[in-house]
Image (cartoon, rainbow, N blue to C red):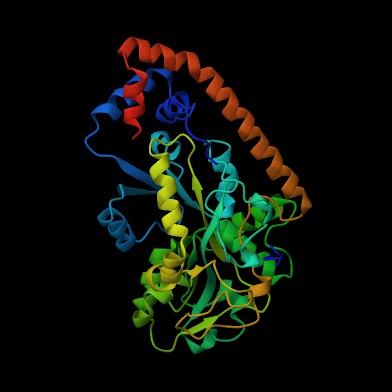
Protein backbone atom coordinates (compact mmCIF):
# COMPACT_ATOMS: atom_id res chain seq x y z
CA UNK A 1 0.00 0.00 0.00
CA UNK A 2 1.06 3.58 -0.39
CA UNK A 3 2.12 4.16 3.19
CA UNK A 4 2.40 7.90 3.81
CA UNK A 5 5.78 8.63 5.40
CA UNK A 6 7.72 11.87 5.96
CA UNK A 7 9.93 12.00 3.79
CA UNK A 8 26.86 10.61 -7.92
CA UNK A 9 28.88 10.62 -10.32
CA UNK A 10 32.43 11.74 -9.44
CA UNK A 11 34.47 13.43 -12.18
CA UNK A 12 35.23 10.72 -14.72
CA UNK A 13 38.74 9.47 -15.10
CA UNK A 14 39.93 8.39 -18.51
CA UNK A 15 39.47 4.77 -17.57
CA UNK A 16 35.96 5.44 -16.33
CA UNK A 17 35.20 7.00 -19.70
CA UNK A 18 36.50 3.89 -21.40
CA UNK A 19 34.47 1.68 -19.10
CA UNK A 20 31.32 3.51 -20.17
CA UNK A 21 32.33 2.99 -23.81
CA UNK A 22 33.00 -0.69 -23.33
CA UNK A 23 29.57 -1.41 -21.87
CA UNK A 24 28.21 -4.21 -19.72
CA UNK A 25 29.92 -7.49 -19.06
CA UNK A 26 27.38 -9.51 -21.03
CA UNK A 27 28.94 -8.29 -24.27
CA UNK A 28 31.58 -10.61 -25.59
CA UNK A 29 35.21 -9.52 -25.64
CA UNK A 30 35.25 -9.50 -29.42
CA UNK A 31 32.61 -6.78 -29.51
CA UNK A 32 34.58 -4.23 -27.49
CA UNK A 33 36.96 -3.29 -30.29
CA UNK A 34 34.08 -2.95 -32.77
CA UNK A 35 32.18 -0.72 -30.40
CA UNK A 36 35.08 1.64 -29.80
CA UNK A 37 35.72 2.01 -33.52
CA UNK A 38 32.01 2.34 -34.33
CA UNK A 39 31.68 5.16 -31.83
CA UNK A 40 34.56 7.01 -33.45
CA UNK A 41 32.91 6.77 -36.87
CA UNK A 42 29.29 7.19 -35.74
CA UNK A 43 27.60 10.02 -37.68
CA UNK A 44 24.92 10.57 -35.06
CA UNK A 45 24.91 10.42 -31.30
CA UNK A 46 21.71 9.48 -29.51
CA UNK A 47 20.14 8.79 -26.15
CA UNK A 48 18.55 5.36 -25.90
CA UNK A 49 15.55 5.14 -23.60
CA UNK A 50 13.98 1.84 -22.52
CA UNK A 51 10.44 2.18 -21.20
CA UNK A 52 8.01 -0.35 -19.74
CA UNK A 53 4.57 1.11 -20.53
CA UNK A 54 4.87 4.49 -22.23
CA UNK A 55 7.92 6.46 -23.27
CA UNK A 56 8.70 10.16 -23.29
CA UNK A 57 6.00 11.96 -25.32
CA UNK A 58 7.05 12.99 -28.83
CA UNK A 59 6.39 16.68 -28.17
CA UNK A 60 8.98 16.58 -25.36
CA UNK A 61 11.48 14.63 -27.48
CA UNK A 62 11.14 17.25 -30.20
CA UNK A 63 11.54 20.11 -27.71
CA UNK A 64 14.66 18.48 -26.22
CA UNK A 65 16.21 18.10 -29.68
CA UNK A 66 15.28 21.66 -30.70
CA UNK A 67 17.06 22.99 -27.62
CA UNK A 68 20.34 21.31 -28.51
CA UNK A 69 19.84 17.91 -26.85
CA UNK A 70 20.76 14.61 -28.49
CA UNK A 71 18.20 12.65 -30.49
CA UNK A 72 16.09 10.38 -28.25
CA UNK A 73 15.48 6.84 -29.52
CA UNK A 74 12.99 4.80 -27.47
CA UNK A 75 12.47 1.05 -27.08
CA UNK A 76 9.70 -0.74 -25.20
CA UNK A 77 10.89 -3.20 -22.58
CA UNK A 78 10.13 -6.84 -23.46
CA UNK A 79 11.79 -10.20 -23.00
CA UNK A 80 13.21 -10.27 -26.54
CA UNK A 81 14.76 -6.81 -26.43
CA UNK A 82 18.35 -7.19 -27.74
CA UNK A 83 21.05 -7.11 -25.07
CA UNK A 84 22.96 -4.30 -26.77
CA UNK A 85 19.91 -2.08 -26.18
CA UNK A 86 18.73 -3.37 -22.81
CA UNK A 87 22.16 -3.40 -21.19
CA UNK A 88 23.61 -0.21 -22.64
CA UNK A 89 20.65 2.19 -22.64
CA UNK A 90 21.14 5.65 -21.18
CA UNK A 91 17.77 5.98 -19.42
CA UNK A 92 15.14 3.54 -18.13
CA UNK A 93 11.49 4.35 -17.36
CA UNK A 94 10.24 1.46 -15.23
CA UNK A 95 7.71 0.55 -12.57
CA UNK A 96 8.88 -0.98 -9.26
CA UNK A 97 8.20 -4.54 -10.38
CA UNK A 98 10.90 -4.42 -13.08
CA UNK A 99 13.63 -2.71 -11.07
CA UNK A 100 15.07 -5.73 -9.29
CA UNK A 101 15.44 -7.75 -12.46
CA UNK A 102 17.11 -4.85 -14.23
CA UNK A 103 19.49 -4.22 -11.33
CA UNK A 104 20.73 -7.81 -11.53
CA UNK A 105 21.58 -7.37 -15.23
CA UNK A 106 22.51 -3.73 -15.71
CA UNK A 107 24.98 -1.43 -13.96
CA UNK A 108 22.90 1.51 -12.68
CA UNK A 109 24.08 4.95 -11.59
CA UNK A 110 24.11 5.41 -7.84
CA UNK A 111 22.38 8.77 -7.60
CA UNK A 112 23.10 9.76 -3.99
CA UNK A 113 22.53 13.53 -3.99
CA UNK A 114 22.17 13.83 -7.77
CA UNK A 115 18.83 14.57 -9.44
CA UNK A 116 17.44 16.12 -6.31
CA UNK A 117 13.66 16.47 -6.19
CA UNK A 118 12.13 19.12 -3.99
CA UNK A 119 8.46 18.97 -3.11
CA UNK A 120 7.75 15.32 -3.93
CA UNK A 121 4.73 14.11 -1.98
CA UNK A 122 5.84 11.71 0.81
CA UNK A 123 3.32 9.27 -0.65
CA UNK A 124 5.85 8.57 -3.41
CA UNK A 125 9.08 8.25 -1.40
CA UNK A 126 10.76 5.80 1.00
CA UNK A 127 9.25 2.70 -0.55
CA UNK A 128 10.90 -0.70 -0.05
CA UNK A 129 12.04 -1.26 -3.64
CA UNK A 130 14.55 1.61 -3.15
CA UNK A 131 14.12 2.72 0.45
CA UNK A 132 16.86 5.39 0.36
CA UNK A 133 16.35 6.53 -3.24
CA UNK A 134 19.85 5.40 -4.19
CA UNK A 135 19.12 4.35 -7.77
CA UNK A 136 15.65 5.59 -8.71
CA UNK A 137 13.68 8.82 -8.94
CA UNK A 138 9.85 8.84 -8.96
CA UNK A 139 8.57 10.55 -12.10
CA UNK A 140 4.84 10.05 -12.75
CA UNK A 141 1.89 7.87 -11.80
CA UNK A 142 -1.64 6.97 -12.82
CA UNK A 143 -4.26 4.65 -11.30
CA UNK A 144 -5.96 1.74 -13.01
CA UNK A 145 -9.73 2.29 -12.93
CA UNK A 146 -12.80 0.49 -14.20
CA UNK A 147 -14.63 1.91 -17.20
CA UNK A 148 -18.26 0.79 -17.29
CA UNK A 149 -20.81 1.76 -19.90
CA UNK A 150 -23.76 -0.64 -19.83
CA UNK A 151 -26.15 -0.17 -16.84
CA UNK A 152 -26.28 -3.87 -15.89
CA UNK A 153 -22.58 -3.71 -15.04
CA UNK A 154 -22.86 -0.48 -13.08
CA UNK A 155 -23.33 -2.15 -9.69
CA UNK A 156 -20.55 -3.65 -7.63
CA UNK A 157 -18.27 -4.14 -10.61
CA UNK A 158 -15.29 -4.63 -8.32
CA UNK A 159 -16.52 -7.95 -6.96
CA UNK A 160 -18.02 -9.16 -10.23
CA UNK A 161 -15.57 -7.91 -12.84
CA UNK A 162 -14.70 -11.36 -14.19
CA UNK A 163 -18.35 -12.02 -15.02
CA UNK A 164 -19.08 -8.62 -16.56
CA UNK A 165 -20.84 -8.82 -19.91
CA UNK A 166 -18.93 -7.77 -23.03
CA UNK A 167 -15.72 -7.06 -21.11
CA UNK A 168 -11.97 -7.23 -21.80
CA UNK A 169 -8.98 -7.02 -19.44
CA UNK A 170 -5.23 -6.29 -19.25
CA UNK A 171 -3.14 -9.25 -20.33
CA UNK A 172 -0.84 -8.84 -17.31
CA UNK A 173 -1.86 -11.84 -15.21
CA UNK A 174 -0.02 -10.50 -12.14
CA UNK A 175 -2.05 -7.29 -12.26
CA UNK A 176 -5.29 -9.29 -12.49
CA UNK A 177 -4.18 -11.54 -9.64
CA UNK A 178 -3.44 -8.49 -7.46
CA UNK A 179 -6.89 -7.13 -8.26
CA UNK A 180 -8.43 -10.46 -7.28
CA UNK A 181 -6.47 -10.58 -4.02
CA UNK A 182 -7.61 -7.10 -3.06
CA UNK A 183 -11.24 -7.93 -3.76
CA UNK A 184 -10.96 -10.74 -1.20
CA UNK A 185 -9.50 -8.39 1.41
CA UNK A 186 -5.86 -9.49 0.97
CA UNK A 187 -2.77 -7.49 0.01
CA UNK A 188 -1.75 -7.16 -3.62
CA UNK A 189 1.85 -8.22 -2.88
CA UNK A 190 1.68 -11.19 -0.48
CA UNK A 191 4.79 -12.38 1.33
CA UNK A 192 4.55 -15.62 -0.62
CA UNK A 193 4.23 -14.64 -4.27
CA UNK A 194 3.40 -18.22 -5.23
CA UNK A 195 -0.17 -17.47 -4.20
CA UNK A 196 -0.40 -14.55 -6.59
CA UNK A 197 1.25 -16.53 -9.37
CA UNK A 198 -1.27 -19.37 -9.03
CA UNK A 199 -4.21 -16.96 -9.09
CA UNK A 200 -2.71 -15.22 -12.12
CA UNK A 201 -2.38 -18.52 -14.02
CA UNK A 202 -6.01 -19.40 -13.28
CA UNK A 203 -7.25 -15.98 -14.43
CA UNK A 204 -5.13 -16.06 -17.57
CA UNK A 205 -6.73 -19.36 -18.56
CA UNK A 206 -10.24 -18.30 -17.56
CA UNK A 207 -10.09 -15.00 -19.46
CA UNK A 208 -7.85 -16.16 -22.28
CA UNK A 209 -9.93 -14.68 -25.11
CA UNK A 210 -10.49 -11.37 -23.29
CA UNK A 211 -6.91 -10.30 -22.57
CA UNK A 212 -5.21 -7.44 -24.44
CA UNK A 213 -2.58 -4.75 -23.91
CA UNK A 214 -3.77 -1.43 -22.47
CA UNK A 215 -3.63 0.46 -25.76
CA UNK A 216 -5.89 -2.13 -27.40
CA UNK A 217 -8.29 -2.05 -24.46
CA UNK A 218 -8.70 1.70 -24.80
CA UNK A 219 -9.28 1.43 -28.55
CA UNK A 220 -11.88 -1.29 -28.07
CA UNK A 221 -13.68 0.69 -25.38
CA UNK A 222 -13.81 4.03 -27.23
CA UNK A 223 -14.90 2.25 -30.43
CA UNK A 224 -17.80 0.63 -28.49
CA UNK A 225 -16.50 -2.91 -29.04
CA UNK A 226 -16.55 -3.62 -25.28
CA UNK A 227 -18.57 -2.22 -22.37
CA UNK A 228 -16.30 -2.90 -19.39
CA UNK A 229 -12.53 -2.76 -18.90
CA UNK A 230 -9.74 -1.82 -16.45
CA UNK A 231 -7.06 0.53 -17.78
CA UNK A 232 -4.77 3.36 -16.63
CA UNK A 233 -6.55 6.67 -16.16
CA UNK A 234 -3.91 8.32 -18.37
CA UNK A 235 -5.73 7.08 -21.48
CA UNK A 236 -8.88 8.94 -20.44
CA UNK A 237 -7.09 12.14 -19.48
CA UNK A 238 -5.20 12.29 -22.80
CA UNK A 239 -8.31 11.43 -24.79
CA UNK A 240 -11.14 12.89 -22.73
CA UNK A 241 -12.96 14.01 -25.91
CA UNK A 242 -13.17 10.35 -27.00
CA UNK A 243 -14.76 8.92 -23.85
CA UNK A 244 -18.07 7.33 -24.91
CA UNK A 245 -21.28 8.82 -23.55
CA UNK A 246 -22.66 7.07 -20.47
CA UNK A 247 -19.25 6.02 -19.16
CA UNK A 248 -18.89 5.44 -15.43
CA UNK A 249 -15.38 5.61 -13.93
CA UNK A 250 -15.30 3.32 -10.92
CA UNK A 251 -12.82 2.23 -8.29
CA UNK A 252 -13.28 0.22 -5.12
CA UNK A 253 -13.04 1.68 -1.64
CA UNK A 254 -10.48 -1.10 -1.02
CA UNK A 255 -8.07 0.70 -3.33
CA UNK A 256 -7.02 0.23 -6.93
CA UNK A 257 -3.69 -0.58 -8.52
CA UNK A 258 -1.26 2.16 -9.57
CA UNK A 259 1.15 2.43 -12.48
CA UNK A 260 4.16 4.18 -10.92
CA UNK A 261 7.01 5.16 -13.28
CA UNK A 262 10.56 5.89 -12.14
CA UNK A 263 13.71 7.08 -13.90
CA UNK A 264 16.95 5.08 -13.68
CA UNK A 265 20.28 5.74 -15.42
CA UNK A 266 22.61 3.16 -16.97
CA UNK A 267 26.11 3.51 -15.52
CA UNK A 268 27.80 2.04 -18.60
CA UNK A 269 25.92 4.15 -21.13
CA UNK A 270 28.01 5.92 -23.78
CA UNK A 271 26.13 9.20 -23.38
CA UNK A 272 25.79 9.15 -19.60
CA UNK A 273 26.56 12.86 -19.19
CA UNK A 274 23.80 13.80 -21.66
CA UNK A 275 21.44 11.27 -20.09
CA UNK A 276 21.88 12.96 -16.73
CA UNK A 277 20.92 16.28 -18.32
CA UNK A 278 17.83 14.69 -19.87
CA UNK A 279 16.78 13.19 -16.52
CA UNK A 280 17.20 16.59 -14.83
CA UNK A 281 15.05 18.16 -17.56
CA UNK A 282 12.32 15.53 -17.20
CA UNK A 283 12.25 15.93 -13.42
CA UNK A 284 12.17 19.72 -13.28
CA UNK A 285 9.15 21.69 -12.08
CA UNK A 286 8.19 22.83 -15.57
CA UNK A 287 7.88 19.30 -16.93
CA UNK A 288 6.10 18.14 -13.77
CA UNK A 289 3.53 20.90 -14.25
CA UNK A 290 3.05 19.84 -17.88
CA UNK A 291 2.75 16.16 -16.97
CA UNK A 292 -1.05 15.89 -16.75
CA UNK A 293 -1.85 17.73 -19.98
CA UNK A 294 0.99 16.21 -22.00
CA UNK A 295 1.21 12.63 -20.71
CA UNK A 296 -2.13 12.14 -18.98
CA UNK A 297 -0.22 11.11 -15.83
CA UNK A 298 -0.20 12.77 -12.42
CA UNK A 299 2.98 14.49 -11.27
CA UNK A 300 4.84 13.37 -8.14
CA UNK A 301 5.63 16.91 -6.98
CA UNK A 302 2.58 17.91 -4.95
CA UNK A 303 1.41 18.73 -1.47
CA UNK A 304 0.23 15.85 0.66
CA UNK A 305 -3.43 15.20 -0.10
CA UNK A 306 -3.27 17.14 -3.39
CA UNK A 307 -1.76 14.36 -5.51
CA UNK A 308 -4.73 14.21 -7.92
CA UNK A 309 -5.37 17.93 -8.31
CA UNK A 310 -6.05 19.20 -11.81
CA UNK A 311 -7.57 16.13 -13.44
CA UNK A 312 -10.42 17.18 -15.79
CA UNK A 313 -12.63 14.22 -14.85
CA UNK A 314 -14.93 13.34 -11.98
CA UNK A 315 -13.17 10.50 -10.17
CA UNK A 316 -14.13 8.05 -7.43
CA UNK A 317 -13.01 9.06 -3.93
CA UNK A 318 -11.78 7.36 -0.76
CA UNK A 319 -9.59 4.77 -2.45
CA UNK A 320 -6.18 6.43 -2.92
CA UNK A 321 -4.67 5.74 0.51
CA UNK A 322 -5.38 2.02 0.08
CA UNK A 323 -3.90 1.78 -3.39
CA UNK A 324 -1.03 -0.54 -4.30
CA UNK A 325 1.57 -0.89 -7.01
CA UNK A 326 2.90 -4.25 -8.16
CA UNK A 327 6.14 -5.58 -6.70
CA UNK A 328 7.91 -8.82 -7.47
CA UNK A 329 8.56 -9.14 -3.74
CA UNK A 330 6.37 -8.36 -0.76
CA UNK A 331 6.15 -4.91 0.84
CA UNK A 332 6.84 -6.09 4.39
CA UNK A 333 10.13 -5.50 6.20
CA UNK A 334 11.78 -8.46 4.51
CA UNK A 335 11.80 -6.81 1.14
CA UNK A 336 13.98 -3.96 2.41
CA UNK A 337 16.68 -6.41 3.45
CA UNK A 338 16.40 -8.29 0.17
CA UNK A 339 16.63 -5.05 -1.75
CA UNK A 340 19.75 -4.03 0.19
CA UNK A 341 21.36 -7.36 -0.60
CA UNK A 342 20.65 -6.92 -4.30
CA UNK A 343 22.03 -3.37 -4.41
CA UNK A 344 25.12 -4.51 -2.47
CA UNK A 345 25.63 -7.37 -4.93
CA UNK A 346 25.29 -4.89 -7.76
CA UNK A 347 28.04 -2.69 -6.31
CA UNK A 348 30.33 -5.70 -5.81
CA UNK A 349 29.66 -6.94 -9.34
CA UNK A 350 30.42 -3.48 -10.71
CA UNK A 351 33.79 -3.37 -8.94
CA UNK A 352 34.66 -6.78 -10.36
CA UNK A 353 33.67 -5.64 -13.88
CA UNK A 354 35.94 -2.61 -13.71
CA UNK A 355 38.88 -4.57 -12.36
CA UNK A 356 38.53 -7.21 -15.09
CA UNK A 357 38.19 -4.57 -17.81
CA UNK A 358 41.42 -2.64 -17.20
CA UNK A 359 43.75 -5.09 -18.93
CA UNK A 360 41.31 -5.57 -21.81
CA UNK A 361 40.94 -1.84 -22.39
CA UNK A 362 44.69 -1.36 -22.38
CA UNK A 363 45.03 -4.13 -24.93
CA UNK A 364 42.39 -2.57 -27.22
CA UNK A 365 44.02 0.85 -26.99
CA UNK A 366 47.39 -0.61 -27.87
CA UNK A 367 46.08 -2.63 -30.83
CA UNK A 368 44.14 0.29 -32.31
CA UNK A 369 46.60 2.99 -31.25
CA UNK A 370 43.81 4.84 -29.46
CA UNK A 371 45.40 7.55 -27.36
CA UNK A 372 43.91 8.80 -24.10
CA UNK A 373 43.08 12.14 -25.74
CA UNK A 374 41.32 10.37 -28.60
CA UNK A 375 39.35 8.15 -26.23
CA UNK A 376 38.30 11.15 -24.17
CA UNK A 377 37.15 12.90 -27.35
CA UNK A 378 34.87 9.96 -28.22
CA UNK A 379 32.84 10.58 -25.07
CA UNK A 380 32.35 14.32 -25.62
Q: Is residue 77 visible?
A: no
User: Which quadrant would residue 340 be assigned to in this image?
Assistant: top right
Residue shown at 47% from the left, 86% from the top: 150
Q: Residue furthest left?
A: 43
337 left or right of 142?
right
Residue shown at 45% from the left, 85% from the top: 247
Q: Nearer the viewer, residue 209 or 118?
A: 118
User: Which quadrant would residue 368 be assigned to in this image?
Assistant: top left
Q: Nearer the viewer, residue 212 or 15?
A: 15
As displayed, is residue 162 above or below residue 12? below
161 left or right of 282?
right
Q: Which percent across, then down, holds residue 360?
A: 45, 15
Quarter that holds the C terminus:
top left
Q: Is residue 85 visible?
A: yes
269 left or right of 106?
left
As displayed, is residue 230 above or below residue 32? below
As displayed, is residue 169 above or below residue 62? below
As displayed, is residue 332 above or below residue 9? below
Quarter that holds the N terminus:
bottom right
Q: Which percent across, then down, holds residue 56?
A: 38, 58
Q: Which percent across, then down, holds residue 45?
A: 29, 39
Q: Which percent across, then down, holds residue 379?
A: 35, 32
Q: Nearer the viewer, residue 71 or 100?
A: 71
Amino acid sequence: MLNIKPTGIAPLTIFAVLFSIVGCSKQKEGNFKERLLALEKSPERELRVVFEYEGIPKIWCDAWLANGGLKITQFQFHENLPDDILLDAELYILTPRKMLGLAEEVALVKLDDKLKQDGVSPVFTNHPFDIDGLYTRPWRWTPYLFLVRNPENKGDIYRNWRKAANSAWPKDKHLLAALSLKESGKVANPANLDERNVIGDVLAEELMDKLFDEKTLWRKYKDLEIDVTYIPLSYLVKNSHQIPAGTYIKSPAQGSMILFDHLLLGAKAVELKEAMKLAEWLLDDEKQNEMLNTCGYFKVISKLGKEMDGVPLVLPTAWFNRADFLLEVSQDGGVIERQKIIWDKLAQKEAEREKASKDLIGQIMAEEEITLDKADHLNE
